C-alpha cells in the first residue's frame, strides 16, 4: 500500500502535533452536491448506490474533488447491518429508512445472527477496497458503523421515530429482550468494523445518533456498556499502526468522562457542549471531534468563518492553548439544502485559523 500523504487526521486522533487542525464533515457526500444528485439519478436509488462498490467509490470521492478535506468517509449507511440480518431495508422518498420486519419480541430477537462480512456485506468491503485503491494514499479512509443502541432504535421502531415509544417501552417492560438485541448488535458491530479495517479502513467511527434520547440512567444501562465493549474488544493494532476509534454521540454531553474512559481514541460531540468544557472534562485522555452546529452552514461565508474560529478557539481554551488532539467536524450531519460554497468557506476557515 502507498504511504499516506496526508496523515493529519490520524495524527490528531493520536493527539500528536499537526501543522493545522484536520477537517472532515459528517455526510460530506450527499444531496447538497449536484454531482451526487446526478449520480443518484443514474443509479436510481440511495440503496442502489450504496450496494454498488463502483458508485459508492465515485460518490465517496466527490466532496474530496471539490474541497481540500483531510479524510474520506466510506459512502454507505449504518442500516446495512440490520438489512443483512434479514430485516429488509428500504427507503421511502422524503420519509427516510424503513424495515419490512421489526424486532419486538424475545423470539424475533433470538432469530437474529451476526451476518457474514465477506458474503452478506461483501459489497461494503469491496467498496472499502476500491476506495483505498482510488485514494492512492491522498487522505485516510474512515469506516463506520451505527452503535448497538442506535441500530436497535431502527430495528424496533421499524424506521425513524420522534418519540422512540416502542423501544423505550421495551426497555421498561422487557429489558431482557432489548439486552439480547443489543448483544447481537454489538457482536455484529465489532465484526463489521474489524472487517472494514481488514479491507483497508484507516480510522473507524461509531455513530450513536440516538444515545441522547435516553435519560442518563437509561443511557448507562442501554447504550454505554455496549460502546464500552466495542472500545475494549475491537482489535485495532498498536502505536503508529493503530486504527483509531471515534465514538460519536448526539446528545452525549452528560457522558464525556465515561466515554473517555472506555479506551476509545476519540469522542465526537455535538454543538450543545462547549468544546473547552469537553476538553477540560476529558483531560487529554482522548482526542475530540466536532462540533460546529451544522446550521451555521445556512449563514453567510463571513458568519461561517467567525463560527469556525469560535469552535477552534474554544478547544484551545480548554487545553490551555494547544490545538493538538482536535479533529474539526460538524456536531451532526449536513443537510441536502446546504450551499457547497459555504462548505468551501468552512474548510478554508479551518485552515486559516488553525495554522500553527
Ligand atoms: O458521512 C458520509 O458522508 C458517509 C455516508 C453516510 C450516510 N449515512 C449516507 C446517507 C453515513 C455515515 C450515514 C450514517 C447514518 N445513516 C446514520 C448515522 C449518522 C447520522 O446522520 O446520524 C443514520 C441515523 C442513518 C440512517 C439514515 N440513512 C437516515 C436517517 C437517512 C436519511 C434519509 C433522508 O431521506 O434524508 C439515510 C439515507 C442516507 N444515508 C442518505 C445519505 C447520503 C440520503 C440518501 C439519498 O436520499 O440520496
Image: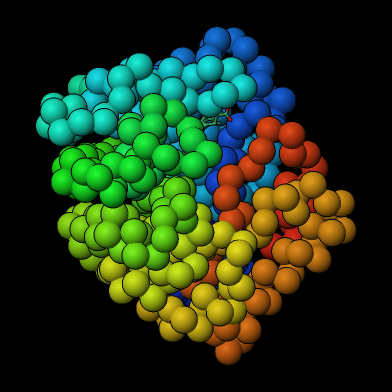
Residue drawn at 64 percent across, 42 percent down:
334
Answer left or right for 228 relative to 49: left
Picture coordinates of residue 133 (x, y %)?
40, 34
Residue 189 seen from this side: no
Residue 297: x and y in percent read 75, 49
Please state the horizontal and vertical placement of residue 113, each as a whole percent of the image. Answer: 15, 31
Foreground of the two, 64 or 215: 215
Residue at (67% x, 69% y) in the render: 311
Q: Residue furthest bottom?
A: 320
Corner quadrant of residue 98: top left
Q: Nearer the viewer, residue 16 or 46?
A: 46
Q: Quadrant of the C terminus?
A: bottom right
Vertical order, 122 against 343 (above or below)? above
Query: Could you tell whether 159 is left or right of 172 in the image?
Result: right
Q: Looking at the image, which residue is at 67% across and 56% down?
A: 293
- The colour scheme is rainbow
In the rendered structure, the answer to whether residue 162 lies left or right of residue 206 reads right
Q: Residue at x 39, y 76 (%)?
A: 257
Q: Is residue 349 visible?
A: yes
- Frontmost residue, 300 versus 118: 300
Looking at the rendering, in which quadrant would you find the N terminus? top left
Q: Nearer the viewer, residue 272 or 246?
A: 272
Q: Identify the image quadrant of residue 43.
A: top right
- Where 51 sits versus 33, above or below? above
Marker count (numbered):
0
Q: Position of residue 94 (x, y in %)?
A: 62, 22
Furthest toward the front, the residue is: 173
Amino acid at each position: 500500500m502507498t504511504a499516506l500523504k496526508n496523515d493529519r487526521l490520524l495524527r490528531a486522533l493520536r493527539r500528536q502535533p499537526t501543522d493545522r487542525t484536520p477537517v472532515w464533515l459528517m455526510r460530506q457526500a450527499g444531496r447538497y452536491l449536484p454531482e451526487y444528485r446526478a449520480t443518484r439519478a443514474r443509479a436510481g436509488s440511495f440503496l442502489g448506490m450504496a450496494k454498488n462498490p463502483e458508485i459508492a467509490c465515485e460518490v465517496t470521492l466527490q466532496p474530496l474533488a471539490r474541497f481540500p478535506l483531510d479524510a474520506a468517509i466510506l459512502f454507505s449507511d449504518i442500516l446495512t447491518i440490520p438489512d443483512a440480518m434479514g430485516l429488509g431495508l428500504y427507503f421511502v422518498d422524503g420519509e427516510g429508512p424503513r424495515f419490512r420486519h421489526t424486532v419486538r419480541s424475545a423470539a424475533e430477537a433470538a432469530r437474529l445472527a451476526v451476518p457474514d462480512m465477506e458474503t452478506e456485506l461483501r459489497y461494503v468491503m469491496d467498496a472499502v477496497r476500491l476506495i483505498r485503491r482510488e485514494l492512492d494514499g491522498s487522505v485516510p479512509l474512515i469506516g463506520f458503523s451505527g452503535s448497538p443502541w442506535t441500530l436497535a432504535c431502527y430495528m424496533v421502531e421499524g424506521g425513524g421515530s420522534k418519540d422512540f415509544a416502542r423501544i423505550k417501552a421495551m426497555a421498561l417492560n422487557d429489558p431482557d429482550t432489548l439486552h439480547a438485541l443489543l448483544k447481537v448488535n454489538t457482536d455484529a458491530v465489532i465484526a463489521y468494523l474489524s472487517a472494514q479495517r481488514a479491507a483497508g479502513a484507516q480510522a473507524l467511527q461509531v455513530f450513536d445518533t440516538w444515545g441522547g434520547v435516553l435519560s442518563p440512567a437509561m443511557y448507562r444501562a442501554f447504550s454505554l456498556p455496549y460502546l464500552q465493549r466495542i472500545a475494549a474488544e475491537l482489535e485495532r493494532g498498536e502505536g503508529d499502526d493503530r486504527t483509531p476509534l471515534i465514538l460519536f454521540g448526539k446528545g452525549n454531553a452528560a457522558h464525556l468522562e465515561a466515554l473517555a474512559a472506555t479506551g476509545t481514541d476519540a469522542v465526537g460531540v455535538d454543538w450543545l457542549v462547549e468544546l473547552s468544557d469537553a476538553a477540560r472534562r476529558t483531560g487529554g485522555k482522548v482526542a475530540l471531534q466536532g462540533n460546529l452546529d451544522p446550521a451555521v452552514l445556512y449563514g453567510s461565508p463571513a458568519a461561517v468563518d467567525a463560527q469556525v474560529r469560535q469552535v477552534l478557539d474554544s478547544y484551545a481554551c480548554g487545553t490551555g492553548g494547544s490545538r493538538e488532539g482536535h479533529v474539526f467536524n460538524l456536531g451532526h450531519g449536513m443537510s441536502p439544502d446546504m450551499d457547497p460554497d459555504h462548505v468551501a468557506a468552512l474548510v478554508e476557515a479551518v485552515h486559516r485559523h488553525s495554522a500553527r
